[in-house]
Image (cartoon, rainbow, N blue to C red):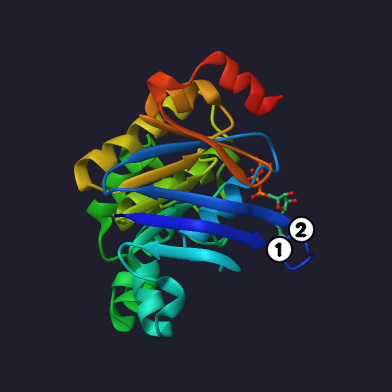
Amino acid sequence: MSFSLDAVGLVHPNGHRALQGVSLAAAGGERLAVIGPSGAGKTTLLRVLGAALRPGEGSVRLLDQAPWQLSAPALRGLRSCIGTVHQSPPIAPRLRVVTAVLAGRLGQWSALRALGSLLRPSDLPGAHEALSRLALEDRLFERCDRLSGGQLQRVGIARVLYQRPALLLADEPVSALDPTLADLTLQQLVRQSEATGATLVASLHAVDLALRWFPRIVGMRGGQVVFDRPVGQVDEAMLKALYA
Ligand SMILES: Nc1ncnc2c1ncn2[C@@H]1O[C@H](COP(=O)(O)OP(=O)(O)OP(=O)(O)O)[C@@H](O)[C@H]1O
């Protein structure tokens, strides 16, 4: 199993319950889209899958490990095998695009190599290849604060493609992109999953994109999974009820 959640519940520090009784599992290489209205708990779910949030209830296994029973170094090692595409990527504004992309492998490199790469980019062909998949190769040496929101979002995705994680999580990965780029970007995420065997979980507001690119659709509402079906079994009535 790539991940499995059993009866997971999570209450945020302000007392707001974001997840309740969530059970969900996926085998390596599966591709799931998580859809549902704003506030349904999609981001919270992805943060649990990224070992960034520890739920108060239920059990979590990620890449065959129980993250919250690991030592700190082992947890860091597990996190380096999980890649997250954020809605707004956490990228320092003054960083050059090439450095931001190469940072995808910082967790896998020795401290010396990581430091060296920050000072002098060590794998230009790798960064170029990841950026060219998102039509951004001409921005290799641009500073990140000179990019548009959509370009920055694609740099964040190139970084995760370069990382080559075993579990690839994408939180609204195409929210800042026009329809053509959104399609190209999802195609690249799917290709990555096919080429590397990575499990891909993406939260999406664009239901049409979820249905086009993902074989399995998970509907969330009010912190709960309300359906989990192969795409061919998701119909209009289910979508209407989900967003009602
Ligand atoms: N850090 C936090 N502290 C307190 N409450 C939070 C926090 N993060 C999320 N929430 C609350 O938890 C619920 C689920 O939020 P979450 O961001 O997971 O939903 P979502 O489905 O991703 O929403 P959206 O589609 O708008 O991004 C919401 O009611 C939200 O207000």
Toward which corner of the image does residue 217 lie, by quadrant?
A: top left
Q: Is residue 203 above or below residue 43?
A: above
In the picture, measured across the screen, residue 227 lies left or right of residue 221, that is: left
Nearest the camera: 86 or 104?
86
Residue type highlighted by circle 1: His
Residue pictured at 55% horizontal, 58% vertical: 8
Image position, residue 171 (x, y; %): 53, 45
* Circle 2 residues within 10 Å: few <14, some 14–19, many ≥20: few
Q: Is residue 127 above or below residue 182?
A: below
Note whether residue 133 is visible: yes
Indicate if the residue with disc 2 has its beta carbon within 8 Å of ligand 1: yes
Q: Which residue is mark 1?
A: 12
Indicate if the residue with disc 1 has its beta carbon within 8 Å of ligand 1: yes
Image position, residue 186 (x, y; %): 40, 33
Residue type highlighted by circle 2: His
SS at mark 1? loop
Image position, residue 181 (x, y; %): 46, 27
C-beta proximity under 8 Å, tags 2 and 1:
yes
Q: Is residue 158 above or below residue 31?
A: below
Toward which corner of the image does residue 32 lie, by quadrant?
A: top left
Note whether residue 53 is visible: no
Q: Which residue is mark 2?
A: 16
Residue pictured at 51% horizontal, 16% vertical: 235
Quarter holding the N terminus is bottom left
Quarter holding the C terminus is top right
SS at mark 2? loop
